[in-house]
Image: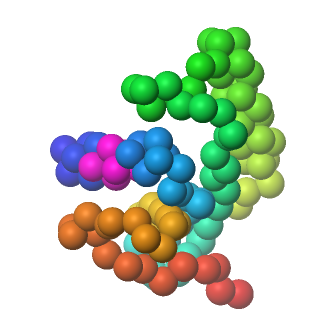
């Protein structure tokens, strides 16, 4: 499907940038399909660990450490869901990737405004 193709392209490029430590933050923007109003804006700051990468671009962590970090993120998301409003209209989403200024961006990608929520 189109969504799967889009996500594969974005996540593939994001993985490459994360491996080189050039991503500063990732933003998920939820927009009302008819109103074109930004309804939700989730910002995920990205900080590279000061750990040496192995030749294949991975960091040596135990499965227990990785599972602990994933569980912490899931707890944060779950805790925030309880106070989010129910969205009343059909929505679309955008993924905004903030990178270092000197990063090569694929030609199919485009610059975007920050898509802030307006009151």
Quadrant of residue 43 within the rendered picture:
bottom right
Q: Would residue 12 be counted in the magenta stretch? A: yes
Residue drawn 21% across the image and 69% down it: 107
Q: Residue furthest bottom?
A: 119
Residue drawn 42% across the image and 26% down it: 55
x, y percentage for residue 85?
A: 70, 61
The foreground one among 44 and 29 is: 44
The reply to whether residue 43 is visible in this rendering is: yes
- Residue 84 in the figure: left or right of residue 57: right
x, y percentage for residue 24?
A: 59, 60
Residue 63's place in the image compared with 42, above or below, is above
In the rendered image, the quadrant that contains the N terminus is top left
Residue 65's place in the image compared with 21, above or below, is above
Give the number of callouts.
0
Residue 70's place in the image compared with 15, above or below, is above
The foreground one among 76 and 80 is: 76
Residues drawn in magenta? 9-14
Residue drawn 61% across the image and 80% down it: 116
- Residue 37 in the figure: left or right of residue 104: right
Q: Would residue 37 be counted in the magenta stretch? A: no
Quadrant of residue 25 within the rendered picture:
bottom right
């Amino acid at each position: 499907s189109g969504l799967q193709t889009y996500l594969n392209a974005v996540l593939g490029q994001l993985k490459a940038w994360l491996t080189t430590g050039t991503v500063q933050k990732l933003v998920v923007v939820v927009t009302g399909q008819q109103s074109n109003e930004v309804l939700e804006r989730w910002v995920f700051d990205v900080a590279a660990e000061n750990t040496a990468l192995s030749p294949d671009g991975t960091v040596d962590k135990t499965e227990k450490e990785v599972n602990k970090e994933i569980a912490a993120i899931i707890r944060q998301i779950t805790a925030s869901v309880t106070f989010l409003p129910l969205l009343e209209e059909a929505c679309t989403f955008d993924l905004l990737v903030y990178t270092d200024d000197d990063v090569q961006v694929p030609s199919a990608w485009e610059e975007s405004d920050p898509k802030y929520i307006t009151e």
